[in-house]
Amino acid sequence: MNAARPRIRVHVVAIDDGHRMLLDRRPKSLTWTLPWAYLTTGDDPGRVARRLVQNTGAAPAMPHVLNVENAFEVGDHFLDITYRCSAERTWKPAPTGTSLWWSLDEISSMELATRAKSAMVTAWPQLWPHL
């Protein structure tokens, strides 16, 4: 059997010092999800997670692995590594990514991807019993 290797995606659950969560919405999508990037050869997945937070102008703490999952989507095989990372907002100008920081009140009215909902339950179980 000659199965293709899965592509590796790095996701980050980032919560800043003001209890805001970092979410991303890809072009042409109405759903907000966790920021993510593909892991390329030679990349360290923890550094990729930190970079996703740094791109917003925040100073990330050391990330730690929250979850690793196999995923099959439209015939493609992925290995998803999700990191948890706290961050200090430094308010540097000109964030370079499409990710934005949101408060719990703002998030409660947003359309979220399943992965983002699961991450919120893990990050804030006492605040999200209804998800």
Image (cartoon, rainbow, N blue to C red):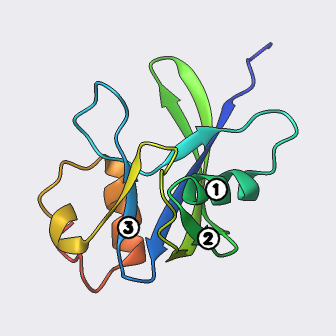
Q: Is mark 1 on a helix, strand or loop?
A: helix
Q: Are marks 1 and 3 in contact (CB under 8 Å)?
A: no
Q: Which amino acid does label 2 sit on?
A: Pro
| Looking at the image, residue 106 lies above or below residue 76 | below
Q: Nearer the viewer, residue 122 or 92?
A: 92
Quadrant showing the C terminus: bottom left
Residue at 59 percent of width and 40 percent of height:
37
Residue at 50 percent of width and 56 percent of height:
56
Q: How far apart are marks 1 and 3 (CA)?
A: 14 Å
Residue at 74 percent of width and 51 percent of height:
45
Residue at 61 percent of width and 70 percent of height:
60
Q: Nearer the viewer, residue 20 or 1?
A: 20
Residue 13, horizontal then vertical, whole percent = 49, 63
Q: Which residue was labeled with disc 3?
A: 21
Q: How far apart are marks 3 and 2 (CA)?
A: 13 Å
The numbered mark, 2 or 1, whose residue comes first in the sequence reads: 1
Q: Which residue was labeled with disc 2?
A: 60
Q: Which of 130 and 54 is in front in this view?
A: 54
Q: Is mark 3 on a helix, strand or loop?
A: strand
Residue 103: quarter of image: bottom left
Q: Which residue was labeled with disc 1?
A: 49
Residue 49, horizontal then vertical, whole percent = 64, 56
Q: Distance between the residues labelled 2 and 1?
A: 9 Å
Q: Which amino acid does label 1 sit on?
A: Ala
Mark 3: few/some/many CA within 10 Å (<14, 14-19, 20+): many
Residue 61, horizontal then vertical, whole percent = 65, 76
